[in-house]
Amino acid sequence: MDNAYHGANKVKEAQGIYSTEEEQARKPWGRKMQYQVPKLSSVSRTGPDYLPGGRHADEDDFKSLGIRGVEFGACLSDEEAQSFMDECYVAFCDLARVLGIDKKDVSLGGTLSLAFGARGHGGSGPATYNPKYHVINFTKDGGAGSLAHEWAHALDYYVGKICRPGSGETDYPISGCPGMEGVPPSVTTLLRRTVSRREAVTHEEQVSMMEERRNQRIQKEEASCKEMLQSIAPKNLTDEQKRRWNQAVQEVYDTRKYADLDMYVVRHCHNWAIEELSKLHKEITGHVIPKDKKRRLNSAFVFLTWAERIPIDSQELKWREQDTEFYTNSWEMDGRYARTVHGRYSDNCERLASAFECYVADKLKEEGNQSQYLTAHSEDVIFVKENGEKVYGGPMGKEREECNRGFDLVFWELKELGVLHWKGPENIPGAADRGKGKRVRQASSFSGNSR
């Protein structure tokens, strides 16, 4: 779809400075466009030398990380393939170092595989994680810069499988189950930090703000429910079919308090009202509502019920919960850009991955280092609003500091649980030279698409 834009339009798109008329004009057929990750003129890195003497990464190096396999596309030359291997291997070593984990942990228990220019395409993003096959694929032209983001998605699914075994027919990300049985408390706390923050207020302000916040959240979740129902509604109904359909939809609304996130995730756990709606859908159209859509519809009503249950505390409180700018920006991105392969930008999984990318970038800065193959887009300005405000892809300022502290607790708990393993700085090659700014290989320009 990006082929529709050339020249100056691409510059305007990357800077996010379209007018309202231009914004609508660049969405043919009313469809939202994918966010285009900015190009990198080079991929640079500073830090310990994990390939001393100018040698190249080979099969043994990736085996030392526990990587299950590496696949290359036919479109890659031998030189390109070797360059990608070198940069990716060193980036994984950087990741293990800043997280303080054993380097084999980057393979997530030996489950992770890699593909370079072999499984993806431009429209799917510069790099994507496939949870079905446990593969991170890097496209030929834009994979560099997104490793930390996609590894976070892989970790999300891996922790979900380890901490909630048998919770579903397929792997399910831990970010989709905050507060549920088996979820490490630090993960739930971190996800809450990406959504809301506390501020000191009087009791009257607290009650007023909580009422306003609850009403706003209800409106958002109601809109999400309506959007899901519209996506599955049969077309060209007779008056009688329309009456029955509306009645079945009303039943879903009326029984929403019985909806649970485990429905359609745990085997044989279904939403009765949605199943009745699906039967009517089959009677009208000849086919049932797909399971994935039933799961998403059920989740939408779970979130609506949660919003309706937000309490208005009558006791005097000295703080209030307020949406973070990070959370608000994620909804701004939803309104402008198409969803990623993992979900909407406002979904927990995408916010977690974006925040993790910032966390790794800040860990590197604390050392005085950088690793663009890991975190090149951690401070990208996604677009600029008409009022001049910048919308970032990840948390910034104090919110970023809060998320970073949350990640510190998450990785401490994962190590305590044995999901990951401790590794101290004494095992870092060249630790004495850390932060001296040794510059390693440069790469040619990379062009990116949506994450």
Image (cartoon, grey):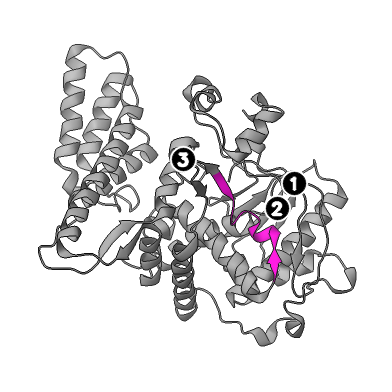
Is residue 378 part of the magenta span, yes or no?
yes
Task: Determine which residue is flagged by label 1.
Answer: 446
Give the residue at x 54% y 58%.
154
The quadrant in which residue 438 appears is: bottom right
**Label 2 environment density (alpha carbons within 10 Å; few <14, some 14–19, many ≥20):** many
The quadrant in which residue 175 appears is: bottom left
CB of mark 1 within 8 Å of CB of mark 2? yes
Is 173 positioned to the left or the right of 96 in the image? left
Q: Amino acid at mark 2?
A: Ala
Chain-order first, disc 1 or disc 2: 2
- Where residue 63 appears, x then y in whole percent? 72, 68
Chain-order first, disc 3 or disc 1: 3
Q: Nearer the viewer, mark 3 or mark 1?
A: 3
Chain-order first, disc 3 or disc 2: 2
Q: Give the vertical position of 277 relative to 391 (above or below).
A: above
Between 379 and 182, the residue placed more toward the observer is 379
Between 46 and 31, the residue placed more toward the observer is 46
- Where residue 125 appears, x then y in whole percent? 61, 43
Between 7 and 404, the residue placed more toward the observer is 7
Label 3: state its secondary structure. Answer: loop
Magenta region = 369-382
Q: What number is the disc on residue 144?
A: 2
Task: Determine which residue is flagged by label 3.
Answer: 387
Give the residue at x 76% y 60%.
44
Is residue 292 part of the magenta span, yes or no?
no
Label 2: state its secondary structure. Answer: loop
Q: What number is the disc on residue 279?
A: none
**Label 3 environment density (alpha carbons within 10 Å; few <14, some 14–19, many ≥20):** few
CA–CA distance in space, label 3 to label 2 = 33 Å
Q: Give the vertical position of 33 relative to 303 (above or below).
A: above
**Label 1 environment density (alpha carbons within 10 Å; few <14, some 14–19, many ≥20):** some
